[in-house]
Amino acid sequence: MRIGTALGSLVAIFFLGCHEPTGITSGPITAVHQAASTRLTNASASPVYYFMVERHTAALINWAPCVATTCASVPGGGSAMVPDSQVTGLNGQSRELILYWWRLVPSPGGGVVFDSIRSAIVPL
């Protein structure tokens, strides 16, 4: 009986120690946090613009989506690695971040505007 318990404990430790990065998919965007960065992958043909913030910090800040084509984005069919240092409010106690993303569309008066802001919670 003791051998079975010990073996079961070893198996549990093995599987708990083999942590695979977890991610989310929100529309065409997949976000996977691994090591000290988050990989964003865009499955659509057009660029997706984004802002990432630590989940608890999100309640404390006031931000607006960037509406310039030079803003942080993931190209259509491409991916981007976002270092943790570029995520607003992320610290050693953080467990989740929020990914906000949107597209830029032509404005009737010229220029571009954001279409709608979507969000997803990314586990760390």
Image (cartoon, grey):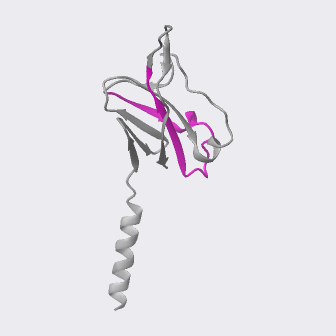
Q: Residue at x 58, y 50 (%)?
A: 94
**Residue lying furthest right in this view?**
60
Q: Residue at x 58, y 46 (%)?
A: 55
**Residue lying furthest bottom in this view?**
1
**Residue lying furthest front in this view?**
108
Residue 25, percent across and down? Answer: 37, 43
- Residue 67 is one of the magenta-drawn residues: no
Figure check: 38 above or below 107: below
30 or 26, nearer to the observer: 26
Q: Quadrant of residue 45?
A: top left
- Residue 103 is one of the magenta-drawn residues: yes
**Residue lying furthest top in this view?**
110
Q: Residue at x 52, y 16 (%)?
A: 68
How many discs appear? Answer: 0
Figure check: 44 above or below 30: above
Figure check: 118 above or below 68: below
Please state if 60 lies on the left or on the right of 18 as rendered. right
Residue 99, percent across and down? Answer: 50, 38
Please state if 10 lies on the left or on the right of 93 as rendered. left
Residue 95, percent across and down? Answer: 55, 52
Quarter of the image containing the N terminus?
bottom left
17 or 23, nearer to the observer: 23
108 or 78, nearer to the observer: 108
15 or 22, nearer to the observer: 22
Residue 19, percent across and down? Answer: 40, 57
Please state if 91 lies on the left or on the right of 70 as rendered. right
Figure check: 34 above or below 69: below
Extent of the magenta region = 78-104
Q: Residue at x 62, y 45 (%)?
A: 91
